[in-house]
Image: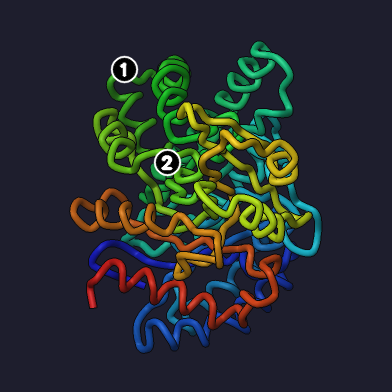
Amino acid sequence: MITPYGHLTYCSNIHPGEKWADHFRSLQENIPYIRQQLAPGQPFGLGLRVANEASIELSKPEILLEFKSWLAENDVYVFVINGFPYGGFHNTVVKDDVHTPDWTTEDRLEYTIRLFNILAELLPEDMHGGVSTPPLSYRLWWKSDNDIYQATRTATQHVLQLLDKLISIEEETGKLLHLDIEPEPDGLLDNISDFITWYNETLIPEGTIYLSGKHGFEPGHAREVILRHIQLCYDICHAAVGYEDPEELLETLNANGIKVGRIQVSSALKVNFSNEKEIKLRAIGTFNEPVYLHQVVARNADHTLTHYPDLTEALADWGEDQEEWRVHFHVPLFINSYGVLESTQGDIVKTLALHCKTPFSSFLEVETYTWGVLPEDMQKPIGESIVREIEWVKKILSYE
């Protein structure tokens, strides 16, 4: 939906369906109710998730035409696509496979190109649009610094090939599309600070060489093109898990001219170990489920950070010198506390306050996808949950 602070939507990765027919059925069952509750009589924007198998099916002209017709009939528009999870995301063990295939592979490149071709067809004429994507690769797959270096170089070259496609789409259709790279704990780009470093020290230099060789662009023009088409997916949950300060991040992004393609409005779990330590350990243990990665970043008494690849490892290694945990678990936005546990809701409030003061993206996308693996007393019907999430964001934006 359209707000004074940008287009506000939610990501359809909450709805199951790796095959397009299954996912489309979920959209047909849920979107009319959600739209009626949130934007009656108004256009409703959708953050679409399209799995690899679904992207192949949706690329067929007759199937794409059917979907476009349904969008028009229901006054729904698509302006962002979630291209992070490639394969199964529901009713299966995801864990680090959410990064598979990564940007070192042709498969990731080809999948993302398909998504952009679909988005170019769906995007309204007067809008730009983005596809989100993983942070190049999963760092723990690479055993040495040299392995990480080579993986980063290979991934960057594939991103530049994708950039070439985006340049062509804009030349042919006039539509500006951007790749929104999403830093995540234990990714090659673990946090937004890593993203900025990679952008300046790898993407810009290699992209300048690539665009100069292929298109004859001067360095200044090459930089402008890269900044235009390669942007940041600012996931508030991920930034909070890394203890990153939103005000400092935005100042650095602005100083470097790096754009934010979308803000993913999401919340993590937080454990303050100043008291009731054993009770809190048992409480956070109830969130240790087998489907998704729940990376943990612990802040120690000496202010250093300890990273754990999943909640299981953190629980096994907990020590008295750990003052706080941030846990990558996309919990509901509108809940600030879970018994003795807390959420990083405060980071959402702070980030959106900065956005209201000086908007830094055109798109806000709610991304709470863990409803099905939450403890039973927190589970509600999906449609009602999505409506409640977006209503809470609207209240924080304070435009009604």
The residue under the point 31% across, 67% down is 396
Q: Nearer the viewer, residue 282 or 243?
A: 282
Q: Position of residue 322 (x, y in %)?
A: 56, 37
Please name which of the two marks, 2 or 1, marks the residue nearer to the observer.
2
Q: Position of residue 77 (x, y in %)?
A: 44, 70
Q: Position of residue 338 (x, y in %)?
A: 55, 66
Q: Nearer the viewer, residue 55 or 379?
A: 379
Q: Is residue 31 above or below residue 304?
A: below
- Is the C terminus in the top left, top right, bottom left or bottom right quadrant? bottom left
Q: Residue beneath label 2, please?
A: 232
State the count of labels.
Answer: 2
Type of amino acid under label 1 = Glu
Q: Quadrant of residue 150?
A: top right
Q: Quadrant of residue 178?
A: top left
The residue under the point 67% across, 62% down is 60
Q: Is residue 34 above or below residue 68?
A: below
Instruction: Give the structural element (helix, strand or loop) at label 2.
Output: strand
Whether residue 362 is visible, yes or no, is yes
